[in-house]
Image: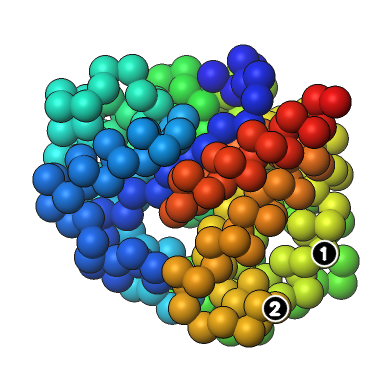
Amino acid sequence: MFKNIEKPLIMGILNVTPDSFSDGGRYNSVEAACHQVEKMLHEGADIIDIGGESTRPNSISVSSGEQIARVIPAIKAIRSRLSSDVLISIDTTLSTVAKAALDAGANLINDISGGGNDEKILTVAAEADCPIILMHIQGTPQTMQDNPCYDDVVVEVLASLNSSINNALQAGVKPHNIAIDVGIGFGKRKQDNIDLLAHLDQFVATGHPVLLGTSRKRFMGSLCDVSEPEELVTATAATTALGVMAGVQMFRVHDVRENRHAADVAWAIKQA
């Protein structure tokens, strides 16, 4: 999948959780989940990212059994009711959840811990010969915003991601199946997020596709003087356009239509 990306991909977020920061509790039922997926596909989503555990700051971790109970019915319903070929990503740090999701019809793994929480997830990806997205996080969702600190956030995040890439390669994941994510908002201060966005080209230069996940993130609220995540659609689209110009190839978003438009316009300009 990653080696055939021709233009920016939009990854629509589907949180089948009761407590995600922006849309927790909205898509817990299979019916609600399918309706939202249908809407995102109509608006231009290329990938549906399904998660059964909130990773907002101070969130409580969820067992593999509970995650599986949340995500598998949604994956099976999407496959049987909506599309046999839509790309589905499983958002988890646990190998057992990843394997169950792949067996149910998911196509790729999105691991916010970069393989650090459960290293067996790298083996799952290798054995399934499926793509995996490795994200950078400082700490855990429970602790990441307590006191994040960097001397040089770009250098340190890049070094950490290179280490995650090496671990994946050693586990047998093929180079073309690895993508990376700088982890905006995951153990980062406001200025850290801004600095990473200003230097996305350095991550693109690794040769691995980059996923950007800024959707409705709190640091943008402080820049725009708004408090509700739903008010940050335009701000998110701005980062999507800038990301396209920097060479980013995938964007994980709540608001598909707006970010599809931003990506397509930026892509046309970049091509010119």
SS of the residue under disc 1: helix
For the point 23% across and 61% down, the residue is 26
Residue 76 shows in the view: no
Task: Provide residue 248's location: percent of width, then percent of height.
Answer: 71, 39
Quadrant occupied by the C terminus? top right
| Colouring mode (rainbow / by chain / secondary structure / one colour) | rainbow
Q: How many marks?
A: 2
Work out whether mark 1 precedes mark 2 in sequence or the reverse, and give the earlier one: 1
Task: Provide residue 230's location: percent of width, then percent of height.
Answer: 45, 69
Q: Residues within 10 Å of mark 1 (few under 14, many from 20)?
A: some
Quadrant occupied by the N terminus? top right
Q: Name which residue type carries label 1.
A: Asp
Q: Is residue 7 above or below residue 42?
A: above
Residue bearing the label numbered 2: 223
Residue bearing the label numbered 1: 195
Circles 1 and 2: CB distance less than 8 Å?
A: no
Q: Is residue 72 left or right of residue 182?
A: left
Q: Is residue 136 above or below residue 4?
A: below
Q: Residues within 10 Å of mark 2 (few under 14, many from 20)?
A: few
73 or 37, nearer to the observer: 37
The mark closer to the camera, 1 or 2, is: 2
Q: Name which residue type carries label 2.
A: Leu
Q: Is residue 25 above or below residue 132?
A: below
For the point 13% across and 45% down, the residue is 30
For the point 63% across and 84% down, the residue is 225
Residue 117 shows in the view: yes
For the point 76% across and 49% down, the residue is 242
Q: Is residue 97 above or below residue 267?
A: below
Q: Quadrant of residue 86?
A: top left
